[in-house]
Structures are given as C-alpha cells and as structure tokens.
Amino acid sequence: MYCSVVIPCLGRADLTRACIASLRAQTGGHELEIVLVDNQNDPATQALASVTERVRVLVQTRNLGFAGACNRGLAAATAPFVLVLNNDTQAAPSMLTRLHRALGGDDRIGFAAPISNRVKGDARVAVGELGATVEGRERLERELCQPCDGLVQDVDSLSGLCLLALRSTWQRLSGFDERFMPGNFEDDDLCLRARLLGLRLVIARDAYLHHEAHQSFRALGIDVHQEIRRQHAVFAKKWQRDPAGRAVLASMTNDLGAAALAAMAAQRLHPAWPDADWWLARWHCQHGQWAQARPLLQALLARCPLHSGAVTQLGLCHLHLDQAPQARKLWRWALSACWFPLDQACDLLVHLGEHSQRQGDLDAAAMDFATALSLKPGDATLLNRLGAVRVEQRRFEEALPLLEEAASKGVALAHTNLGICHYQRGDGTRALAHFAKAAQQLPDDATAQSNYEKARAASAR
C-alpha cells in the first residue's frame, strides 16, 4: 500500500519520533509518505525530517488545532491512501496491513480504525500500558489481535485517533470541520457526514494502536472535560436543525425516544443514512414491537452487514416472532463472522439455549450452553444451566460435577437442580440436603420452598 500518514504535532517530538519508528517498523512492505504538521513551529519536530527522506514537515505559523492541521496535511498528501494519526501513538507491527485489508473488504467502507487502549467507543480494549513497548505490541498482536484475524465491526462513529481512508474519500468529505478548535467532536462530525453519504465505518478488530492520550491538551494546559463540553455545544449548534444531527445528539444522552423521532424525519431527508433504521429499530424493540423492528434491522444489515448490535436485535426479533430457526442460523453465522464482546456472545448462546430448552430440544440447548461455557470456562451460571439440561436429559453423571461446581460458586439454584438430580437417582438423603440449602438460600422462592417441604415429607414416610 502506498499511503500518506498525516500526523498533527504540538511539541513532544519525542512522542512523534516513537510514532514514526513504529510506522517504519510496519510489516507488509508499505510505501509511506509521512507528513508532520507542526502546529508549534517546534525545532525538535522539524528536525524529524532528517529521520528519513520519507518524512516531510509542514511548519505552521500558528496553532491550527487538530482539524486544521489534519486538513493541511491532507491537502499535501499524494498517496492514494491516507492515514490520519495522533502523534502520541505507536502502532503494532501489522496495524497498517490489517487496516488496509479491512478498508478493502467492501467499496462501501469509508473509514477503518484500529482498536486501542485509550479511545472512545467499541474500539477500546482494557490492556493498560502493555502496548507501550515493542515487545508488548507484538504480544498484543499474538494474543489479542490474531484470534480476531480478519474480523471487522460496523459502527456508526469512529474516533479521529487513527483513520485510514482513500484520499478520494477525504476529498469528498472536505476533511475535518475546522470550527472544532483546538479539538474534540471533529471526528463525530466527520463520521456523521460520512454516514449521511451511506459510507460504512469499521473497526478492524485485529489491528492494534497504543495511545498515550491527551498529550496536546496537556501541553496547552486545557481541561479536557471542560473542552469536551464546549465542543459538544459547537457540534449541537451545527447539527440541531438537521434531524440526523438531532438523532445523534439524542443518542449521546441515551434519549432513545427522541433519537427515533428525529430518525423518522431524517429518513426522508437523508435516504442513504443507515443509522435512521438503527434508532427506529431499537425504539420498536424497546417497546416489544418485534415485527416492526425486523425489516428496519434487515435494511441496516443489508448496508452494514457486520453490525453486531443489529445482528443481536434481529435474532431477538426472530425469537419473539417464533422464528427460532432463523435466529439460530443468523447467530451461528454471526458468532464466526462478526465481533462480539465476550459477554454478548455468551448472551446470544444463552438466548438460543433457553429457547431450545422451552421447546423441548434438549440436545440443541445443551450444545448452546456448552459452547457458551467454552467461551467463559468456569462461569457458575452457565455451569448451572448446562447441568440443569443434563438433568432433564437424565444424564445425571454428567450433570453432577457441573452442578456441584456451580453450587460451590454460590449459585443457589444449583442446589435445587442437585436435589432433583439426586432424587431421580434414588438418593433421597442427598436430595433433601440440597433442597434444604436451596430453601435456606432462596427464602422467597416458592418453588425452592415447595421442593424442600415435599422432600422432607417424603423422607419422613
């Protein structure tokens, strides 16, 4: 890939030097043009032009802020691909290769971004400072990124920390809006404008970038939280008259009703905007209107097929509409093709398992709970669920160790299931002991109390 890398700088040439070093160490044989935009007329930053002939420094006479500096760099970029990158970052060895692969996966994709230790939204991963060293970034690629090889996630917004796009895409959007000075919300604004054109925004789940965070604001002595509030007001002033903007603003305060109402108006004004379907579908799901939500989610996934939130909600629609085979087919595909947080992936499998159990398909239920347990080994709730299914299947010897481990980890219902298991095996003494523990731990559970009373009466005869 021939790529221009635009890096806005405000002092801290030491960080910029480390950033450049991580770019020069990238695997994949990329040809890079590195454009440093010096917002501070800093001699140390300008000296970085001697690191390699591929580094150019654009010296500015005043601080243009993040957006202005990026735009000057974008105007100077010559490569067909352009990466906008913060200077207080260091890329894992294969980051560029993986971002490039993600961007090329579909010509509707406008921007691709990596995961990072400090970034907003779904791209954030809790790895602390592990990526601050070369060895740490190599380890993260092996342990965190490689299991997600090739996985991308559709989202409705990306951070401006690191964005790869075609130069033509940057030109089409006229770069960043420079009214967001010195920084913050210029990326939200860019992403909303991209989405209004129907472009996909994706996170490459296998690409990692280490981030120091807020170094430029600290250098300026700016209170980050106060600045975020100020720039939010700038964003609101720009977008509050546009229904798509009102939907995004409402979503920032978790006002789903207002977001859905604005999205309905936005559908007429911005027919290419996929997120109108998302906000309307979420509102219908919240109100149990599954039949109305389903076509909206299907429309969103037709344009953004790896949107894990939409996949989750569509599967729930199928389940609530008694279309379990469709939900199972969708989620089975999604668990291999999409990225989900671990808890969310387990939740999908639990939903499928519960539905199969209610329908009497115990083999399918056991498979779903066992798969969830393989993702979260030792999870007490999952141990109890799988154990309960094994009891229903009368596979008592398999049920016992599962339920005993769940009970030892504090799951009171496991004692009820152990009581049933021992009772079915003809061991009334152990059954009574477990029913007694369940009744003691669940004093308000009528079933637990009833089981105990019945077992006690049976033992007295």
Image (cartoon, helix red, strand yellow):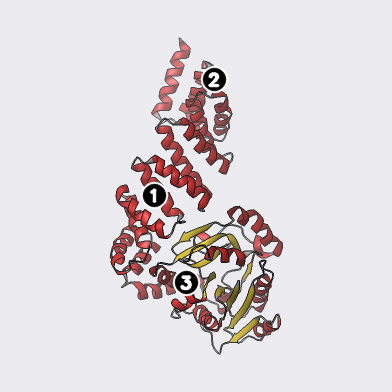
Alpha carbon separation for disc pair 1 and 3: 29 Å
The reply to whether callout 1 and callout 2 are in contact (CB within 8 Å) is: no
Packing grade of label 1 (10 A; few <14, some 14-19, many >=20) is: many
Image spot of residue 405 (x, y percent): 58, 32
Q: Which residue is mark 1?
A: 314
Q: Which residue appears farthest toward the bottom when viewing the image?
A: 61
Q: Looking at this view, is 166 or 158 the one in front?
A: 166
Packing grade of label 3 (10 A; few <14, some 14-19, many >=20) is: many
Image spot of residue 65 (x, y percent): 51, 80
Q: Which residue is mark 3?
A: 187
Amino acid on which the number 1 mark rests in the picture: Leu
Can the viewer see residue 63? yes
Image spot of residue 435 (x, y percent): 48, 24
On the rendered structure, is 20 left or right of 420?
right
* Nearest to N terminus: mark 2 or mark 3: 3
Q: Is residue 422 above or below residue 387?
A: above
Q: Nearer the viewer, mark 1 or mark 2?
A: 1
Amino acid on which the number 2 mark rests in the picture: Arg
Can the viewer see residue 344? no
State the SS at label 1: helix
Q: Which residue is mark 2?
A: 430
Alpha carbon separation for disc pair 2 and 3: 62 Å
Q: Is residue 62 above or below residue 350?
A: below
Amino acid on which the number 3 mark rests in the picture: Asp
Residue 156 figure quarter: bottom left
Packing grade of label 2 (10 A; few <14, some 14-19, many >=20) is: some
Image spot of residue 426 (x, y percent): 52, 15
The reply to whether callout 1 and callout 3 are in contact (CB within 8 Å) is: no
